[in-house]
């Protein structure tokens, strides 16, 4: 195990005025080895952070600036967190990670040679660029860079993340589902051809931009399915499950929107293989996550709830015997803005910078 570094890192957040950006600021502003030197936000350019997010008042933070005015050379940034909308990050990251020494007429911003990028969008998550084009509606604009990206589901890719220059953080739904399903498949405990994922998310998962479907009157006092059989996180889930199984997998995945601010709960239905029982699966998952700082398998009979992880980087997993013989029900919960997004990004930041993995993420869940 490598010795943890004590070096401070100069950090930029692109897209700092969204929910994920705000969560990154909240976590990194108290990180003992992160100095926030650049925050970009197009809609709120030139405003202080506390004018956009009053809960972040009293912190010594740079003002929000538009990306084109960012002083990359002068700021000497070590790590960039990209919290930009899907489809916009490829060009930005291609510019930032372009090698130096190109034509003098090329004035695109660049990072120094050892600087790193952590992308929270979907732009570098899918290894197959044709699959990306199919689900996101346009050709991938940085296929060469895509081949260098590491899929950053921390618990399963620590060595690759630590050595990477570009990490693609998983989506919130995939993180919730993959944490219990990947080790279950690797153990040979479940049938790869019969996985049903019924997931429910808080409204913050839709982002901060004004949308009619996110209005209070549209969301409150109800629940609805969306992206039925067509949600963009499905190919991401299938990509990682296929890697774990060593063969192509297609899952039945349906997301739902809940009238709450944050949190994801995934109820996952699986068929057990080769005489495995629900108790066996629970024990296997508990053994796999022994010593993990942020993933915990709860005792038999305990149903994890989103209120048990709110505001934290934790994921809780429960396993139940189904009334249908040979089947089990797995319940997985996390905070979509923390372990499902900004918290996992900080976890990967720590690995990439040779810091203690839990730095800046020690806070316990909020309750009630």
Image: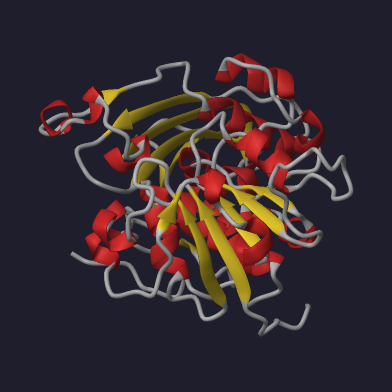
Q: Residue at x 34, y 21 (%)?
A: 226
Camera-nearest residue between 273 and 314: 314
Q: Can residue 225 be seen?
A: yes
Q: Quadrant of the C terminus?
A: bottom left
User: x, y (%) of residue 255?
Assistant: 38, 29
Q: Is residue 115 above or below residue 215?
A: below
The answer to whether residue 191 is left or right of residue 28 is right
Camera-nearest residue between 86 and 59: 59
Q: Quadrant of residue 249?
A: top right
User: x, y (%) of residue 131?
Assistant: 67, 20
Q: Residue at x 64, y 49 (%)?
A: 183
Q: Can residue 290 be seen?
A: no
Q: Is residue 267 above or below residue 359?
A: above
| Residue closest to the far front | 105
The answer to whether residue 302 is left or right of residue 151 is left
What coloring was used for the rendering?
Answer: secondary structure
Q: Is residue 294 above or below residue 270?
A: below
Q: Quadrant of the N terminus?
A: bottom right
User: x, y (%) of residue 154?
Assistant: 63, 57
Camera-nearest residue between 150 and 188: 150
User: x, y (%) of residue 279?
Assistant: 50, 53
Q: Residue at x 27, y 27 (%)?
A: 211
Q: Residue at x 79, y 44 (%)?
A: 98
Camera-nearest residue between 60 and 45: 45
Q: Quadrant of residue 95?
A: top right
The answer to whether residue 108 is left or right of residue 280 is right
**Number of dots carrying numbers:** 0
């Amino acid at each position: 195990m490598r010795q943890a570094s004590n070096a401070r890192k100069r950090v930029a957040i692109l897209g700092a005025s969204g929910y994920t950006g705000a969560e990154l600021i909240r976590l990194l502003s108290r990180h003992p080895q992160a100095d926030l030197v650049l925050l970009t936000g197009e809609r709120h350019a030139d405003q202080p952070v506390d004018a956009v997010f009053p809960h972040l008042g009293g912190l010594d933070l740079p003002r929000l600036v538009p990306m084109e005015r960012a002083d990359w050379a002068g700021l000497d940034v070590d790590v960039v967190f990209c919290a930009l909308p899907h489809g916009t990050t490829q060009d930005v990251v291609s510019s930032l990670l372009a090698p130096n020494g190109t034509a003098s007429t090329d004035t695109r911003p660049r990072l120094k040679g050892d600087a790193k990028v952590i992308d929270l969008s979907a732009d570098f998550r899918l290894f197959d660029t044709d699959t990306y084009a199919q689900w996101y509606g346009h050709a991938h604009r940085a296929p060469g860079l895509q081949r260098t990206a590491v899929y950053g589901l921390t618990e399963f890719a620590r060595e690759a993340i630590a050595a990477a220059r570009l990490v693609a953080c998983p989506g919130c739904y995939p993180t919730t589902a993959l944490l219990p399903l990947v080790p279950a498949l690797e153990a040979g405990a479940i049938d790869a051809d019969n996985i049903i994922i019924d997931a429910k998310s808080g409204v913050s998962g839709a982002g901060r931009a004004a949308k009619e479907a996110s209005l209070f009157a549209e969301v409150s006092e109800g629940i609805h399915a969306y992206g039925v059989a067509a949600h963009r996180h499905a190919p991401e889930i299938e990509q990682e499950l296929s890697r774990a199984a060593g063969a192509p997998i297609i899952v039945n995945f349906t997301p739902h929107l809940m009238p709450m601010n944050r949190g994801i709960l995934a109820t996952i239905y699986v068929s057990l293989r080769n005489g495995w029982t629900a108790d066996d699966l629970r024990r296997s998952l508990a053994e796999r996550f022994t010593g993990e700082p942020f993933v915990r398998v709860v005792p038999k009979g305990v149903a994890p709830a989103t209120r048990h992880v709110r505001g934290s980087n934790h994921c809780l997993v429960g396993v139940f015997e189904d009334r249908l013989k040979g089947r089990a029900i797995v319940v997985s919960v996390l905070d979509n803005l923390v372990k499902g997004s900004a918290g996992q990004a900080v976890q990967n930041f720590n690995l990439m910078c040779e810091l203690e993995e839990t730095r800046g993420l020690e806070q316990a869940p909020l309750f009630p």
